[in-house]
Image (cartoon, rainbow, N blue to C red):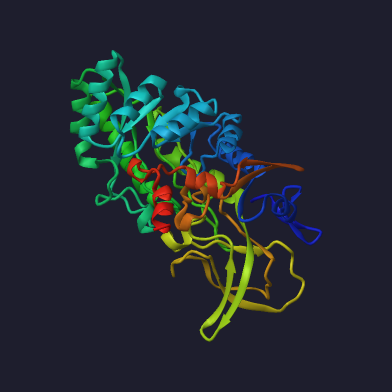
Amino acid sequence: MHHFAYRGGLLHAEEVSIADIAAAVGTPFYCYSTATLERHYQVFAEAFAAADARICYAMKANSNQSVLMTLAALGAGMDVVSGGELARALAAGVGGERIVFSGVGKTDGEIAAALDARVFSINVESEAELAAIARIAREKGVTAPVSLRVNPDVDARTHAKITTGMAENKFGIAYDEAPRLYRRVAELDGVMVTGVATHIGSQVTELAPFRAAFQRMAELVARLRRDGHHIAHVDLGGGLGIPYRAGDRPPHPREYAELVLSVLGGTGATLVLEPGRLIAGNAGILVTRVVHTKRGGAGSFLIVDAAMNDLIRPTLYEAHHEILPVREQTSSASMRYDIVGPVCETGDYLARDRELPDMASGELLALMTAGAYGAVQSGTYNSRPLIAEVLVRAHEYAVVRPRQAIDELIGLDRIAPWLDGVDARRSRLATL
């Protein structure tokens, strides 16, 4: 469920007209609904209310500071995968004791920052990383709380680019190697075992892969405890899918919680859960304006002012986003379009072969379910500045990331010293 609906013939975010926002801030822009963010977090939290559970929002899905602060106010911790995300979490007021540091390529500087922040746990991805954490912790005179991220070799049955729990994926420590690595942790100064972690992928839309992975984790916890290791928590990652199409019916958080507790509830371990897409996905839309319509022999195109640099998911993952006209259409007349952007790439499309009302230049479209992995993956290809992000709460809205000006984008560059004065030299040559 989300809080985007037609009112008086216009699409609204909660009580605010999308057309009014577009008139004020321009297009394209991302728009997030506070009520939807809060509801999704609360539904997930309520599903685990009877358990000893920590919910750490996976902020790679959407790391806007206002989004983070909205969730932190509800009690969310954060799952971070970089030093930049750690800094954002701390800036949002989330204490280190509520932060889990994941990620496959942590640098020495990031490890040091995690130790300085006294994070709840560092999820270790390799034996080399374990050695680095131990070394840095000894240099600082502290003990690092670590959990080994174990790869259970389970197919999440999701898109190949977002599956993370199979043996051929770069993530985690091989399941059969885990007991040896836990023994290694016990031998090292500077590190202390606090738990075990796993994550099999994103946008998982059936429970069977979770069950297979969690059963393997339950067996591993029992074995590690028999070997004398103190396993206080089990980090299950995230990955529960959301509906992108009208007919999608992924498992409800309540069903997911029932599965988790049936498999791991008897371990007595604290459960760490890291939903990201589930919280933010349906809480956001991308609003774009039709620039031109183009009809050709092979099909019809809506050329819009948003592009693959603003929302790369359709190009990168063949992802589907429902598309709604911002002005509700009353006519039954429709056409099939490819919705494409202005970027100089054939891969620059937002949707293909979609049935929409007959559209004209200047009309607005909303790409639904764009709150996760939208703005965070955007870039400036073709020197297109980053677009605005807007957060709505009831009848009010705020620009929570201003649209980047082209002068700001160019200003990020620095002129090489040997090019200093090049304009003056050109002027002198022109007079010869």
Image quarter for residue 161? bottom left
Residue 350 drawn above or below residue 225: below
Compared across the picture, whether 222 is left or right of 362 comes to: left
Q: Residue furthest right?
A: 8
Q: Quadrant of residue 263?
A: top left
Residue 32 at x, y = what percent? 63, 46
Q: Quadrant of the C terminus?
A: bottom left
The answer to whether residue 255 shows anywhere in this view is no
Q: Nearer the viewer, residue 102 or 400?
A: 400
Q: Residue furthest front?
A: 432
Q: Residue at x 41, y 42 (%)?
A: 414
Instruction: Give the side of residue 52 with respect to residue 194, left or right.
Output: right
Estimate the x, y position of residue 353 in percent, counting from the top left: 54, 74
- Looking at the image, can residue 295 be seen? yes
Q: Position of residue 60 (x, y in %)?
A: 46, 42
Q: Give the number of marks.
A: 0
Q: Nearer the viewer, residue 1 or 271?
A: 1
Task: Point out the residue furthest to the top here.
Answer: 141
Left or right of residue 137, residue 284 in this image: right
Query: Which of these two is toward me, 333 or 223?
Result: 333
Residue plotted at (54% across, 58% down): 244
**Above or below 52: residue 150:** below
Q: Residue 7: percent from the left, percent from the top?
A: 78, 56
In front here: 245 or 45? 245
Q: Residue at x 37, y 43 (%)?
A: 199
Q: Residue furthest bottom?
A: 297
